[in-house]
Amino acid sequence: MANIEKQRERLINLLKELFQLDQPELDFGFYRIMHAKAGQVSDFLENDLLAMIRDAFGEADEARIAEAKAAYEAARKQAEEYGAPDPDATEPVQKAKAAFDAAKASGSNEGDVYDHLYRFFERYYDQGDFMSRRYFARETDGKAAPYAIPYDGREVYLHWANKDQYYIKTSEYLSNFTFDPTQATEYREAHGELLEGKPLKVHCRIVAASEGEHNNVKASEQTERYFIIHDAEPVKLETGENGEPELVIQFEYRADPEKTGQEGTWRKKRLDEAAERIKATLGELDKAGDYVTALMTPAPTEKEKNRTLLEKYIAKYAARNTMDYFIHKDLGGFLRRELDFYIKNEVMRLDDIESADAPRVETYLAKVKVLRKIARHLIDFLAQLEDFQKKLWLKRKFVVDTQYCITLDRIPEAFYPEIAANEAQREEWVRLFSIDELEGYSAPLTVDFLKANNKLLILLCHISPPLRRQDSVAACRRRCRS
Protein backbone atom coordinates (compact mmCIF):
# COMPACT_ATOMS: atom_id res chain seq x y z
CA MET A 1 0.00 0.00 0.00
CA ALA A 2 2.87 2.35 0.73
CA ASN A 3 4.16 1.86 -2.81
CA ILE A 4 0.70 2.57 -4.25
CA GLU A 5 0.51 5.81 -2.27
CA LYS A 6 3.89 6.92 -3.69
CA GLN A 7 2.80 6.13 -7.24
CA ARG A 8 -0.48 7.99 -6.68
CA GLU A 9 1.34 11.04 -5.28
CA ARG A 10 3.80 11.04 -8.20
CA LEU A 11 0.89 11.00 -10.67
CA ILE A 12 -0.92 13.84 -8.89
CA ASN A 13 2.23 16.00 -8.92
CA LEU A 14 2.66 15.43 -12.65
CA LEU A 15 -0.99 16.27 -13.35
CA LYS A 16 -0.68 19.49 -11.36
CA GLU A 17 2.21 20.43 -13.61
CA LEU A 18 0.20 19.54 -16.72
CA PHE A 19 -2.74 21.60 -15.49
CA GLN A 20 -0.26 24.41 -14.61
CA LEU A 21 -1.24 24.44 -10.94
CA ASP A 22 2.35 24.20 -9.74
CA GLN A 23 2.98 27.92 -10.34
CA PRO A 24 0.44 29.77 -8.14
CA GLU A 25 2.81 32.70 -7.78
CA LEU A 26 2.64 33.71 -11.47
CA ASP A 27 -0.05 36.33 -12.06
CA PHE A 28 -0.44 37.14 -15.76
CA GLY A 29 -2.05 35.86 -18.94
CA PHE A 30 -3.34 32.30 -18.94
CA TYR A 31 -2.09 31.74 -15.39
CA ARG A 32 -4.77 34.12 -14.09
CA ILE A 33 -7.47 32.05 -15.75
CA MET A 34 -6.03 28.84 -14.32
CA HIS A 35 -5.81 30.34 -10.83
CA ALA A 36 -9.50 31.23 -11.02
CA LYS A 37 -10.25 27.55 -11.66
CA ALA A 38 -7.47 26.18 -9.46
CA GLY A 39 -9.86 25.09 -6.71
CA GLN A 40 -12.07 23.18 -9.13
CA VAL A 41 -9.12 21.48 -10.86
CA SER A 42 -7.39 20.63 -7.57
CA ASP A 43 -10.61 19.12 -6.20
CA PHE A 44 -10.89 17.00 -9.35
CA LEU A 45 -7.30 15.76 -9.09
CA GLU A 46 -7.20 15.09 -5.35
CA ASN A 47 -10.75 13.83 -4.80
CA ASP A 48 -12.82 13.03 -7.90
CA LEU A 49 -9.99 11.38 -9.85
CA LEU A 50 -8.88 9.13 -6.99
CA ALA A 51 -12.47 8.21 -6.21
CA MET A 52 -13.01 7.42 -9.88
CA ILE A 53 -10.00 5.10 -9.93
CA ARG A 54 -11.01 3.35 -6.72
CA ASP A 55 -14.60 2.93 -7.92
CA ALA A 56 -13.43 1.59 -11.27
CA PHE A 57 -11.15 -0.91 -9.59
CA GLY A 58 -13.87 -1.80 -7.14
CA GLU A 59 -16.32 -2.52 -9.93
CA ALA A 60 -13.77 -4.46 -11.99
CA ASP A 61 -12.40 -6.43 -9.03
CA GLU A 62 -15.84 -7.31 -7.65
CA ALA A 63 -17.09 -8.48 -11.02
CA ARG A 64 -13.95 -10.49 -11.69
CA ILE A 65 -13.93 -11.99 -8.20
CA ALA A 66 -17.62 -12.92 -8.46
CA GLU A 67 -17.08 -14.54 -11.85
CA ALA A 68 -14.01 -16.45 -10.65
CA LYS A 69 -15.83 -17.59 -7.52
CA ALA A 70 -18.78 -18.82 -9.55
CA ALA A 71 -16.46 -20.74 -11.87
CA TYR A 72 -14.64 -22.31 -8.91
CA GLU A 73 -17.89 -23.38 -7.23
CA ALA A 74 -19.22 -24.79 -10.50
CA ALA A 75 -16.03 -26.81 -11.06
CA ARG A 76 -16.10 -28.18 -7.51
CA LYS A 77 -19.78 -29.12 -7.80
CA GLN A 78 -19.14 -30.88 -11.09
CA ALA A 79 -16.26 -32.84 -9.52
CA GLU A 80 -18.52 -33.92 -6.66
CA GLU A 81 -21.21 -35.03 -9.09
CA TYR A 82 -18.68 -37.18 -10.93
CA GLY A 83 -17.87 -38.83 -7.61
CA ALA A 84 -14.31 -37.57 -7.13
CA PRO A 85 -13.06 -38.67 -3.70
CA ASP A 86 -11.24 -35.34 -3.23
CA PRO A 87 -12.82 -32.63 -5.47
CA ASP A 88 -10.17 -30.04 -4.54
CA ALA A 89 -7.40 -32.26 -5.86
CA THR A 90 -8.83 -32.49 -9.39
CA GLU A 91 -7.17 -30.46 -12.13
CA PRO A 92 -10.25 -28.41 -13.21
CA VAL A 93 -10.96 -27.40 -9.61
CA GLN A 94 -7.33 -26.46 -8.99
CA LYS A 95 -7.29 -24.24 -12.11
CA ALA A 96 -10.55 -22.58 -11.09
CA LYS A 97 -9.26 -22.03 -7.56
CA ALA A 98 -6.02 -20.51 -8.93
CA ALA A 99 -8.07 -18.10 -11.02
CA PHE A 100 -10.20 -17.26 -7.99
CA ASP A 101 -7.11 -16.59 -5.85
CA ALA A 102 -5.57 -14.45 -8.63
CA ALA A 103 -8.73 -12.35 -8.83
CA LYS A 104 -8.76 -11.79 -5.08
CA ALA A 105 -5.10 -10.74 -5.14
CA SER A 106 -5.43 -8.30 -8.04
CA GLY A 107 -5.31 -5.17 -5.88
CA SER A 108 -1.78 -4.47 -7.16
CA ASN A 109 -3.33 -3.46 -10.50
CA GLU A 110 -4.18 -0.08 -9.00
CA GLY A 111 -0.49 0.73 -8.57
CA ASP A 112 0.22 -0.45 -12.12
CA VAL A 113 -2.45 1.91 -13.48
CA TYR A 114 -0.97 4.85 -11.56
CA ASP A 115 2.43 3.99 -12.97
CA HIS A 116 1.14 3.69 -16.56
CA LEU A 117 -0.79 6.96 -16.31
CA TYR A 118 2.36 8.72 -15.12
CA ARG A 119 4.55 7.20 -17.82
CA PHE A 120 2.06 8.01 -20.57
CA PHE A 121 1.42 11.67 -19.77
CA GLU A 122 5.05 12.33 -18.81
CA ARG A 123 6.33 11.36 -22.26
CA TYR A 124 4.06 13.89 -24.02
CA TYR A 125 4.85 16.99 -21.94
CA ASP A 126 8.05 18.98 -22.20
CA GLN A 127 8.60 22.37 -20.51
CA GLY A 128 5.05 23.61 -20.87
CA ASP A 129 4.24 22.13 -24.29
CA PHE A 130 2.44 18.93 -25.28
CA MET A 131 4.76 17.15 -27.69
CA SER A 132 6.54 13.83 -27.93
CA ARG A 133 9.75 13.77 -25.89
CA ARG A 134 12.84 12.06 -27.23
CA TYR A 135 13.30 8.48 -26.03
CA PHE A 136 16.37 6.54 -27.02
CA ALA A 137 14.59 3.19 -27.28
CA ARG A 138 15.38 0.65 -29.97
CA GLU A 139 12.51 -1.15 -31.66
CA THR A 140 12.60 -4.93 -31.24
CA ASP A 141 10.46 -7.90 -32.27
CA GLY A 142 8.64 -7.81 -28.95
CA LYS A 143 8.26 -4.05 -28.58
CA ALA A 144 7.60 -1.27 -31.07
CA ALA A 145 9.10 2.23 -31.04
CA PRO A 146 7.64 4.60 -28.40
CA TYR A 147 5.39 6.62 -30.74
CA ALA A 148 2.91 6.10 -33.56
CA ILE A 149 3.06 8.37 -36.61
CA PRO A 150 -0.11 8.69 -38.74
CA TYR A 151 0.87 7.80 -42.29
CA ASP A 152 -1.26 7.75 -45.45
CA GLY A 153 1.03 5.73 -47.73
CA ARG A 154 2.71 8.53 -49.71
CA GLU A 155 6.23 7.92 -50.99
CA VAL A 156 7.86 10.61 -48.84
CA TYR A 157 6.44 11.71 -45.49
CA LEU A 158 7.91 14.47 -43.31
CA HIS A 159 7.18 14.44 -39.60
CA TRP A 160 8.51 16.53 -36.69
CA ALA A 161 7.91 16.69 -32.94
CA ASN A 162 5.74 19.81 -32.89
CA LYS A 163 3.73 19.08 -36.00
CA ASP A 164 0.11 20.31 -35.90
CA GLN A 165 0.98 23.02 -33.37
CA TYR A 166 0.87 26.79 -33.46
CA TYR A 167 4.16 28.57 -32.82
CA ILE A 168 4.02 31.53 -30.44
CA LYS A 169 6.66 34.20 -30.93
CA THR A 170 8.34 34.67 -27.58
CA SER A 171 9.23 38.29 -28.32
CA GLU A 172 5.60 39.22 -27.66
CA TYR A 173 6.05 38.51 -23.95
CA LEU A 174 8.85 40.95 -23.19
CA SER A 175 6.74 43.31 -21.07
CA ASN A 176 4.43 40.95 -19.22
CA PHE A 177 5.72 38.98 -16.23
CA THR A 178 4.14 39.35 -12.79
CA PHE A 179 4.51 37.12 -9.74
CA ASP A 180 3.69 37.05 -6.04
CA PRO A 181 6.57 35.54 -4.05
CA THR A 182 4.30 34.90 -1.05
CA GLN A 183 2.50 32.23 -3.10
CA ALA A 184 5.70 30.31 -3.88
CA THR A 185 6.22 26.91 -2.26
CA GLU A 186 9.56 28.00 -0.82
CA TYR A 187 7.98 31.03 0.86
CA ARG A 188 5.15 28.94 2.31
CA GLU A 189 7.64 26.52 3.84
CA ALA A 190 9.85 29.27 5.28
CA HIS A 191 7.21 31.83 6.36
CA GLY A 192 4.02 29.85 6.83
CA GLU A 193 2.81 32.20 9.57
CA LEU A 194 2.86 35.19 7.18
CA LEU A 195 0.60 33.71 4.53
CA GLU A 196 -2.46 35.63 5.74
CA GLY A 197 -0.83 38.95 4.90
CA LYS A 198 -1.51 41.10 1.87
CA PRO A 199 -0.23 39.91 -1.54
CA LEU A 200 3.08 41.25 -2.82
CA LYS A 201 3.02 41.88 -6.57
CA VAL A 202 6.34 42.05 -8.43
CA HIS A 203 6.48 43.12 -12.09
CA CYS A 204 9.43 42.53 -14.43
CA ARG A 205 9.43 45.11 -17.22
CA ILE A 206 11.48 46.16 -20.19
CA VAL A 207 12.15 49.91 -20.20
CA ALA A 208 14.46 49.90 -23.22
CA ALA A 209 14.84 47.35 -26.00
CA SER A 210 16.93 47.35 -29.15
CA GLU A 211 15.58 46.00 -32.41
CA GLY A 212 16.42 42.40 -33.21
CA GLU A 213 17.01 40.57 -36.47
CA HIS A 214 14.16 40.06 -38.96
CA ASN A 215 13.03 37.42 -41.49
CA ASN A 216 14.41 34.47 -39.51
CA VAL A 217 17.95 35.86 -39.67
CA LYS A 218 19.98 34.37 -36.85
CA ALA A 219 21.47 36.98 -34.54
CA SER A 220 25.26 37.32 -34.58
CA GLU A 221 27.45 37.77 -31.51
CA GLN A 222 27.29 41.53 -32.05
CA THR A 223 23.49 41.68 -32.34
CA GLU A 224 22.52 39.00 -29.78
CA ARG A 225 20.38 40.69 -27.11
CA TYR A 226 20.58 40.14 -23.35
CA PHE A 227 18.58 41.08 -20.27
CA ILE A 228 20.57 43.79 -18.52
CA ILE A 229 19.39 45.57 -15.39
CA HIS A 230 18.37 49.19 -15.96
CA ASP A 231 21.28 51.16 -14.56
CA ALA A 232 19.46 54.45 -13.84
CA GLU A 233 16.59 52.91 -11.85
CA PRO A 234 16.81 49.14 -11.26
CA VAL A 235 13.73 48.96 -9.03
CA LYS A 236 10.87 51.23 -8.08
CA LEU A 237 7.53 51.14 -6.29
CA GLU A 238 4.28 51.91 -8.08
CA THR A 239 0.71 52.10 -6.81
CA GLY A 240 -1.27 49.09 -8.00
CA GLU A 241 -4.93 48.66 -8.86
CA ASN A 242 -5.85 48.03 -5.22
CA GLY A 243 -4.00 51.13 -4.02
CA GLU A 244 -1.11 49.17 -2.51
CA PRO A 245 2.54 49.67 -3.55
CA GLU A 246 3.88 47.13 -6.03
CA LEU A 247 7.50 46.46 -6.90
CA VAL A 248 8.73 46.95 -10.47
CA ILE A 249 12.07 45.47 -11.59
CA GLN A 250 13.31 47.24 -14.72
CA PHE A 251 15.46 45.67 -17.44
CA GLU A 252 16.96 46.62 -20.76
CA TYR A 253 16.91 44.11 -23.61
CA ARG A 254 19.74 44.97 -25.95
CA ALA A 255 23.03 43.89 -27.43
CA ASP A 256 25.96 43.90 -25.03
CA PRO A 257 29.23 45.29 -26.43
CA GLU A 258 31.09 43.94 -23.37
CA LYS A 259 30.08 40.36 -24.08
CA THR A 260 32.85 37.76 -23.89
CA GLY A 261 32.85 33.98 -23.87
CA GLN A 262 29.89 31.72 -24.58
CA GLU A 263 26.35 33.05 -24.84
CA GLY A 264 24.87 30.97 -22.00
CA THR A 265 27.68 31.82 -19.62
CA TRP A 266 27.40 35.53 -20.36
CA ARG A 267 23.61 35.50 -20.00
CA LYS A 268 23.98 33.88 -16.58
CA LYS A 269 26.62 36.45 -15.61
CA ARG A 270 24.34 39.37 -16.51
CA LEU A 271 21.44 37.88 -14.56
CA ASP A 272 23.65 37.38 -11.49
CA GLU A 273 24.74 41.00 -11.74
CA ALA A 274 21.11 42.07 -12.00
CA ALA A 275 20.22 40.10 -8.86
CA GLU A 276 23.05 41.68 -6.88
CA ARG A 277 22.09 45.17 -8.05
CA ILE A 278 18.45 44.60 -7.09
CA LYS A 279 19.43 43.32 -3.64
CA ALA A 280 21.60 46.37 -3.05
CA THR A 281 18.95 48.84 -4.24
CA LEU A 282 15.89 47.19 -2.72
CA GLY A 283 16.93 47.92 0.83
CA GLU A 284 17.09 51.65 0.07
CA LEU A 285 13.41 51.86 -0.93
CA ASP A 286 10.83 52.95 1.61
CA LYS A 287 8.03 50.47 2.33
CA ALA A 288 9.98 47.66 0.66
CA GLY A 289 10.74 45.62 3.78
CA ASP A 290 8.19 42.92 2.98
CA TYR A 291 9.64 42.55 -0.52
CA VAL A 292 13.14 42.13 0.90
CA THR A 293 11.92 39.37 3.21
CA ALA A 294 10.00 37.59 0.47
CA LEU A 295 12.53 37.84 -2.35
CA MET A 296 15.46 36.84 -0.14
CA THR A 297 13.73 33.57 0.81
CA PRO A 298 16.06 30.66 -0.05
CA ALA A 299 15.09 28.60 -3.10
CA PRO A 300 18.12 26.32 -3.56
CA THR A 301 18.66 23.72 -6.27
CA GLU A 302 21.24 20.96 -6.58
CA LYS A 303 23.54 23.20 -8.63
CA GLU A 304 22.78 26.52 -6.93
CA LYS A 305 22.75 26.02 -3.17
CA ASN A 306 22.48 29.76 -2.39
CA ARG A 307 19.73 30.68 -4.87
CA THR A 308 16.92 32.93 -3.60
CA LEU A 309 13.40 33.52 -4.91
CA LEU A 310 14.63 36.70 -6.58
CA GLU A 311 17.20 34.81 -8.66
CA LYS A 312 14.67 32.06 -9.40
CA TYR A 313 12.16 34.45 -10.96
CA ILE A 314 14.72 36.55 -12.78
CA ALA A 315 16.01 33.38 -14.45
CA LYS A 316 12.43 32.27 -15.22
CA TYR A 317 11.63 35.67 -16.73
CA ALA A 318 14.71 35.61 -18.97
CA ALA A 319 14.12 31.97 -19.98
CA ARG A 320 10.49 32.66 -20.79
CA ASN A 321 11.55 35.21 -23.37
CA THR A 322 14.23 33.06 -25.00
CA MET A 323 12.29 29.78 -25.38
CA ASP A 324 9.79 28.65 -28.00
CA TYR A 325 6.19 27.94 -27.06
CA PHE A 326 3.51 25.98 -28.91
CA ILE A 327 -0.25 25.40 -28.76
CA HIS A 328 -1.55 22.10 -30.07
CA LYS A 329 -4.24 22.29 -32.76
CA ASP A 330 -5.94 19.04 -31.68
CA LEU A 331 -4.54 17.86 -28.37
CA GLY A 332 -7.49 15.58 -27.60
CA GLY A 333 -7.25 13.65 -30.85
CA PHE A 334 -3.46 13.43 -30.62
CA LEU A 335 -3.40 12.05 -27.05
CA ARG A 336 -6.30 9.62 -27.62
CA ARG A 337 -4.53 8.18 -30.66
CA GLU A 338 -1.26 7.88 -28.77
CA LEU A 339 -3.04 6.33 -25.76
CA ASP A 340 -4.36 3.44 -27.84
CA PHE A 341 -0.89 2.84 -29.26
CA TYR A 342 0.65 3.00 -25.77
CA ILE A 343 -1.81 0.43 -24.41
CA LYS A 344 -1.12 -1.97 -27.29
CA ASN A 345 2.63 -1.50 -27.04
CA GLU A 346 3.28 -1.10 -23.31
CA VAL A 347 0.35 -2.63 -21.40
CA MET A 348 -1.21 -5.45 -23.38
CA ARG A 349 1.10 -6.89 -26.01
CA LEU A 350 -0.34 -9.58 -28.28
CA ASP A 351 2.59 -11.93 -27.67
CA ASP A 352 1.82 -11.93 -23.95
CA ILE A 353 -1.87 -12.65 -24.57
CA GLU A 354 -1.11 -15.56 -26.86
CA SER A 355 1.08 -17.29 -24.29
CA ALA A 356 -0.92 -16.33 -21.17
CA ASP A 357 -3.61 -18.39 -19.48
CA ALA A 358 -7.20 -17.20 -19.09
CA PRO A 359 -6.80 -15.60 -15.61
CA ARG A 360 -3.79 -13.66 -16.84
CA VAL A 361 -5.71 -12.39 -19.86
CA GLU A 362 -8.58 -11.30 -17.65
CA THR A 363 -6.14 -9.35 -15.49
CA TYR A 364 -4.81 -7.61 -18.59
CA LEU A 365 -8.31 -6.72 -19.74
CA ALA A 366 -9.34 -5.34 -16.35
CA LYS A 367 -6.22 -3.21 -16.17
CA VAL A 368 -6.66 -1.90 -19.72
CA LYS A 369 -10.31 -1.07 -19.12
CA VAL A 370 -9.58 1.06 -16.05
CA LEU A 371 -6.44 2.64 -17.54
CA ARG A 372 -8.21 3.67 -20.75
CA LYS A 373 -11.24 5.03 -18.89
CA ILE A 374 -9.20 7.23 -16.54
CA ALA A 375 -6.69 8.35 -19.18
CA ARG A 376 -9.39 9.42 -21.62
CA HIS A 377 -11.10 11.39 -18.85
CA LEU A 378 -7.84 13.23 -18.14
CA ILE A 379 -7.26 13.79 -21.85
CA ASP A 380 -10.69 15.40 -22.19
CA PHE A 381 -9.86 17.70 -19.28
CA LEU A 382 -6.46 18.69 -20.72
CA ALA A 383 -7.92 19.17 -24.19
CA GLN A 384 -10.44 21.69 -22.82
CA LEU A 385 -7.59 23.84 -21.47
CA GLU A 386 -5.51 23.55 -24.64
CA ASP A 387 -8.52 24.32 -26.84
CA PHE A 388 -9.22 27.40 -24.74
CA GLN A 389 -5.67 28.63 -25.32
CA LYS A 390 -6.09 27.90 -29.03
CA LYS A 391 -9.27 30.00 -29.13
CA LEU A 392 -7.42 32.89 -27.49
CA TRP A 393 -4.57 32.54 -29.96
CA LEU A 394 -6.88 32.42 -33.01
CA LYS A 395 -9.22 35.14 -31.78
CA ARG A 396 -9.33 37.96 -34.27
CA LYS A 397 -7.82 41.19 -33.06
CA PHE A 398 -10.37 43.99 -33.11
CA VAL A 399 -9.31 47.35 -34.55
CA VAL A 400 -10.66 50.00 -32.21
CA ASP A 401 -9.53 53.04 -34.19
CA THR A 402 -7.42 53.87 -37.25
CA GLN A 403 -5.92 57.17 -38.35
CA TYR A 404 -3.88 58.16 -41.39
CA CYS A 405 -0.74 60.27 -41.53
CA ILE A 406 -0.30 61.98 -44.91
CA THR A 407 2.08 64.67 -46.10
CA LEU A 408 0.49 67.87 -47.36
CA ASP A 409 1.68 67.39 -50.95
CA ARG A 410 -0.60 64.32 -51.18
CA ILE A 411 -3.70 66.29 -50.20
CA PRO A 412 -5.69 68.40 -52.73
CA GLU A 413 -5.08 72.13 -52.20
CA ALA A 414 -8.84 72.66 -51.91
CA PHE A 415 -8.52 71.44 -48.31
CA TYR A 416 -5.60 73.76 -47.41
CA PRO A 417 -7.76 76.59 -45.96
CA GLU A 418 -9.41 74.17 -43.57
CA ILE A 419 -6.05 72.68 -42.56
CA ALA A 420 -4.52 76.11 -42.06
CA ALA A 421 -7.34 77.06 -39.69
CA ASN A 422 -6.97 73.92 -37.56
CA GLU A 423 -5.37 74.92 -34.24
CA ALA A 424 -4.81 71.37 -32.98
CA GLN A 425 -2.71 70.48 -36.03
CA ARG A 426 -0.77 73.74 -35.82
CA GLU A 427 0.09 73.16 -32.14
CA GLU A 428 1.24 69.63 -32.90
CA TRP A 429 3.51 70.86 -35.69
CA VAL A 430 4.99 73.43 -33.36
CA ARG A 431 5.62 70.74 -30.74
CA LEU A 432 7.04 68.16 -33.14
CA PHE A 433 8.73 70.19 -35.88
CA SER A 434 9.16 73.72 -34.38
CA ILE A 435 7.45 75.33 -37.38
CA ASP A 436 7.22 78.56 -35.40
CA GLU A 437 10.88 79.09 -36.31
CA LEU A 438 10.21 78.88 -40.06
CA GLU A 439 9.83 81.87 -42.31
CA GLY A 440 6.22 82.87 -42.96
CA TYR A 441 4.87 81.28 -39.79
CA SER A 442 1.77 82.85 -38.25
CA ALA A 443 -1.12 81.87 -36.02
CA PRO A 444 -3.39 80.87 -37.60
CA LEU A 445 -1.39 79.46 -40.50
CA THR A 446 -1.79 80.65 -44.07
CA VAL A 447 -2.33 78.67 -47.23
CA ASP A 448 0.91 80.06 -48.67
CA PHE A 449 2.83 78.71 -45.66
CA LEU A 450 1.38 75.25 -46.23
CA LYS A 451 2.29 75.35 -49.93
CA ALA A 452 5.84 76.40 -49.06
CA ASN A 453 6.15 73.54 -46.51
CA ASN A 454 4.13 70.85 -48.19
CA LYS A 455 6.18 68.00 -46.70
CA LEU A 456 4.62 68.51 -43.26
CA LEU A 457 2.88 65.38 -41.98
CA ILE A 458 -0.80 65.81 -41.17
CA LEU A 459 -2.75 63.52 -38.85
CA LEU A 460 -6.31 63.15 -40.14
CA CYS A 461 -7.80 62.84 -36.65
CA HIS A 462 -7.24 66.61 -36.28
CA ILE A 463 -9.29 67.35 -39.38
CA SER A 464 -13.06 67.72 -39.56
CA PRO A 465 -15.20 64.85 -40.96
CA PRO A 466 -15.57 66.26 -44.53
CA LEU A 467 -11.86 65.76 -45.20
CA ARG A 468 -12.01 62.30 -43.60
CA ARG A 469 -14.88 61.17 -45.81
CA GLN A 470 -14.28 57.95 -47.70
CA ASP A 471 -14.09 59.66 -51.09
CA SER A 472 -11.57 62.23 -49.80
CA VAL A 473 -9.35 59.58 -48.27
CA ALA A 474 -9.58 57.55 -51.48
CA ALA A 475 -8.44 60.60 -53.45
CA CYS A 476 -5.47 61.01 -51.12
CA ARG A 477 -4.61 57.33 -51.56
CA ARG A 478 -4.69 57.67 -55.36
CA ARG A 479 -2.32 60.60 -55.15
CA CYS A 480 -0.02 58.60 -52.86
CA ARG A 481 0.06 55.71 -55.35
CA SER A 482 0.77 58.06 -58.20
Image (tube, grey):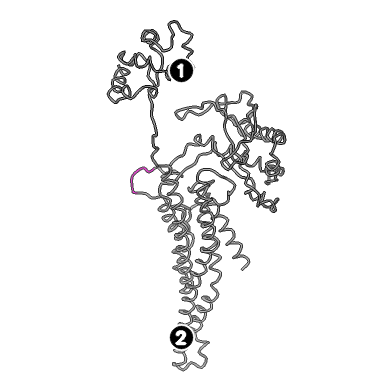
User: Which residue is outermost to the left?
Assistant: 471
Cβ atoms under marks 2 and 1 closer than 8 Å:
no
User: Which residue is outermost to the top?
Assistant: 439
Q: Amino acid at mark 1?
A: Glu
Query: Number of labelled discs?
Result: 2
Residue 338: % across, % down = 44, 54
Residue 253: % across, % down = 57, 29
Secondary structure category for the residue under label 1: helix
Q: Is residue 156 magenta?
A: yes
Which of 205/367 is in front? Answer: 205
Mark 1 nearby-residue class (10 Å; few <14, some 14–19, many ≥20): some
Residue 285: % across, % down = 69, 35
In this image, 124 relative to 5: left or right? left
In this image, 381 relative to 239: left or right? left
- Give the residue drawn at x 47%, y 54%: 382
Write the start and end of the magenta stretch as one range.
152-157
Q: Amino acid at mark 2?
A: Ala
Kindly report the secondary structure that dominates the magenta region of the rendered protein. loop
Q: Earlier in the sequence, mark 2 or mark 1?
A: 2
Residue 377: % across, % down = 45, 60
Mark 2 nearby-residue class (10 Å; few <14, some 14–19, many ≥20): many
The quarter of the picture where residue 178 lies is top right
Which of 165/137 is in front? Answer: 165
Residue identifier under label 2: 75
Q: Is residue 235 magenta?
A: no
Secondary structure category for the residue under label 2: helix
| Image vertical order of residue 87 relative to residue 57, above or below | below
| Image vertical order of residue 478 relative to residue 41, above or below | above
Q: Quadrant of the C terminus?
A: top left
Q: Nearer the viewer, mark 2 or mark 1?
A: 1
Residue identifier under label 1: 427
